Amino acid sequence: MELNRKKFDSFDLNILFDNIHYDLLYLRFFNLKKTQLEKLEKLEKEISELKKEIIENNYITAKGVYKIFKVLKENNFILILNENEKISDRIETIKNKNGVCIADFLAEVDYIGLISTSVFVNDIVFEKHTSNDFSKLYIINSLAIMMAEALCEVLHYYLRKDFGIEENNDLKELYKKPKKGLRYSPGYPGLDISVNKNIYELLNAKELGSNITSSYMIEPESSVQAIAIFNNNAKYH
């Protein structure tokens, strides 16, 4: 098992394009469902051409960091241990209506993974495309948001490998594939949005060039943070 922090300053965009949940992209940002074939075909063609342009012109830089931490469980709290096995932080997990929380999927002494990803839209995009070219800028920003999620999915896969979990998966459409354990993001059921600060500081994610606001949001908007639990019985709230 590898506990070393791993940071990526320019992740392979092709891998991220292979791991975008495109049905979700079309629905979330373009309000298009699978049945709207003609509109989908037109959008897919536009996105396919734009992906080539993004790579050729260095429009986007994807960055991420992850680390496995040894932890203790104390009721609904996850206690993070440092290299000297001293408690360095406490993360509260929220019980659902059945009284179950994320910490319940941990042993008294266990391990978790922390992930932070940020995808940056570079200034050259705005130099090449004016504000009048709203359609392209909107698609690029939409892709960046989904690429941050895709990078989190890929780094979660790397975390599981580092933890010693063997999966016969290639790096494509990982979101569709069975995995051991789950990842949970702050702001969703189970974790308060303030846990973003714990993750950000424990990973020293400011090295990616991202920022955390006073309301615990990560900037740029195309950023994702998560706690990974390795228990195969873990469930979402």
Image (cartoon, grey):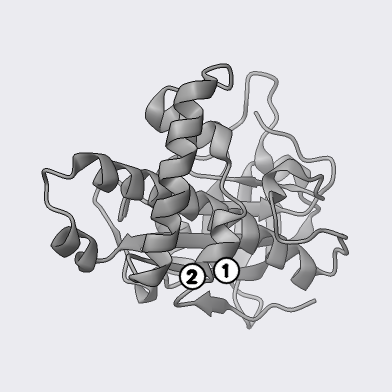
Query: From the viewer's perspective, is 121 left or right of 192?
Result: left
The location of residue 91, given as percent across then percent down, is 54, 52
Which one is nearer the viewer's eye here, 65 or 69?
Answer: 65
Instruction: Give the numbered dot on residue 203.
Output: 2
Quadrant containing the C terminus in the rendered view? top right
Amino acid on which the number 2 mark rests in the picture:
Leu
**Quarter of the image where one finds residue 113:** bottom right
Identify the disc placed on residue 66.
Answer: 1
Q: Nearer the viewer, residue 57 or 109?
A: 57
Q: Which one is nearer the viewer's eye here, 40 or 6?
A: 40
Of the residues under marks 2 and 1, which one precedes in the sequence?
Answer: 1
* Residue 132 vertical placement versus 7 (above, below): above
**Residue 79 in which image quadrant:** bottom right
For residue 108, above or below residue 234: below
Residue at image point 70% right, 67% down? 158
Residue in view at x 61 percent, y 74 percent:
86
Determine if residue 133 is in view: yes
Give neighbour class at mark 2: few <14, some 14-19, many 20+ (Cα, 10 Å).
many
**Contact, CB < 8 Å: mark 2 with mark 1?**
yes
- The residue sitting at 81% across, 53% down in the picture is 107
Q: Residue at x 77, y 54 (%)?
A: 230
Q: Which residue is at the front of the view, 20 or 51? A: 51
Q: Name the spot of residue 77 as percent of width and height, x first.
A: 61, 48
Q: Secondary structure at mark 2?
A: loop
Q: How many marks?
A: 2
The image quadrant where one finds the N terminus is bottom right
Query: CA separation, marks 2 and 1?
Result: 7 Å
Element at label 1: strand
